[in-house]
Amino acid sequence: MTDSTIIKTENLKKIYQMGEIEVPALNGVSLMIDQGEFVAIMGPSGSGKSTLMNILGCLDSPSAGQYQLDGQDVSKLDRAQLANIRNKKLGFIFQSYNLLPRMSALENVFLPMMYSKSAEGNQEKMKEKAEEMLNVVGLGDRVNHQPKELSGGQQQRVAIARALINDPVLILADEPTGNLDSKSAEEIMEILHELHQSGRTIVMVTHEHEIAEQTQRIIAIRDGLVEADNKNGKR
């Protein structure tokens, strides 16, 4: 592991208990992702990719094995500690956007800062940062619009701005183009490329090969194991 390694997992396992039956979701996943990489994770339904994404996003803990995020072992942290890590180090982009419907775009973006000590409760500071992030994704003229007043592509842009607000070391995107038409999906991928080119580390789950092929590297998961891990020559 080097100083530039953002993700390192060793023999990561996750077993779910279904009554008396143990159901393995991850069977020993070991991988490394360095700072500045743009990586796609692919796999069929039931492959374990969603479980892996949840663990990488500190939304769940492994049953066994080790997960180091930005040099810190987070494998055995409790829920409160994991929530703190999520807020400080991770930015999330979801397929369904996960915006609060009664809040404006601006309010949705600065919401994570409400839980961050760095903002120190300064509303003006939070609004300025949120406006800056909305400008980054091309929505500087939509700050006061509620989600229902925005297209799907625009809502996903708000979600990306929200993911950036606390300057995370890692952006996790779960099927970020899954609910979008082709044009909107292309626009969202262009934003992700720009973020990657600016030095951001992005890990994206997708089932779309044409989307995965736009990344630097594709990790294929099957039956809870890494089936393939290939550099992508197309990007």
Image (cartoon, rainbow, N blue to C red):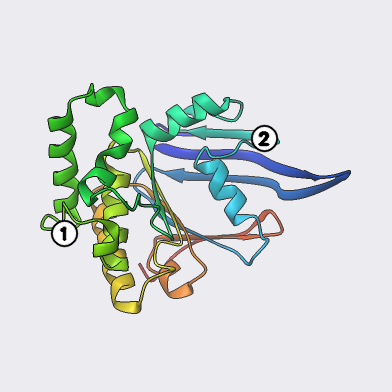
Considering depth in this image, is 71 or 25 the residue closer to the camera?
25
Q: Which residue is mark 1?
A: 138
Q: CA distance from mark 1 to mark 2?
A: 41 Å
Let me know if residue 192 appears in the view: no
Q: Where does residue 134 sit, x and y in percent of width and height?
A: 18, 51
Residue that sits furthest to the bottom in the current view: 182
In the picture, measured across the screen, residue 51 lies left or right of residue 173, that is right
How would you rate the neighbour count of disc 2 (Cα within 10 Å): few for under 14, some for 14-19, many for 20 or more? some
Considering depth in this image, is 231 or 155 the residue closer to the camera?
155
Let me know if residue 225 appears in the view: yes
Considering depth in this image, is 199 or 191 the residue closer to the camera?
191
Q: Secondary structure at mark 1?
A: loop
How would you rate the neighbour count of disc 1 (Cα within 10 Å): few for under 14, some for 14-19, many for 20 or more? some
Q: Residue at x 59, y 39 (%)?
A: 60
Q: Where does residue 172 sit, x and y in percent of width and height?
A: 42, 49
Q: Where does residue 206 sit, x and y in percent of width and height?
A: 49, 64
Q: Residue at x 23, y 51 (%)?
A: 105
Q: Is residue 132 above or below residue 225?
A: above
Q: Where does residue 196 sit, x and y in percent of width and height?
A: 29, 53
Q: Residue at x 27, y 54 (%)?
A: 158
Residue that sits furthest to the right in the current view: 20
Q: Which residue is mark 2?
A: 65
Q: Is residue 133 above or below residue 141?
A: above
Q: Secondary structure at mark 2?
A: strand
Q: Quadrant of residue 220?
A: bottom right
Give the amino acid type for the residue marked by disc 1 in the picture.
Gly
In the picture, measured across the screen, residue 187 lies left or right of residue 229, that is left
**Rendered-image quadrant of the C terminus:** bottom left
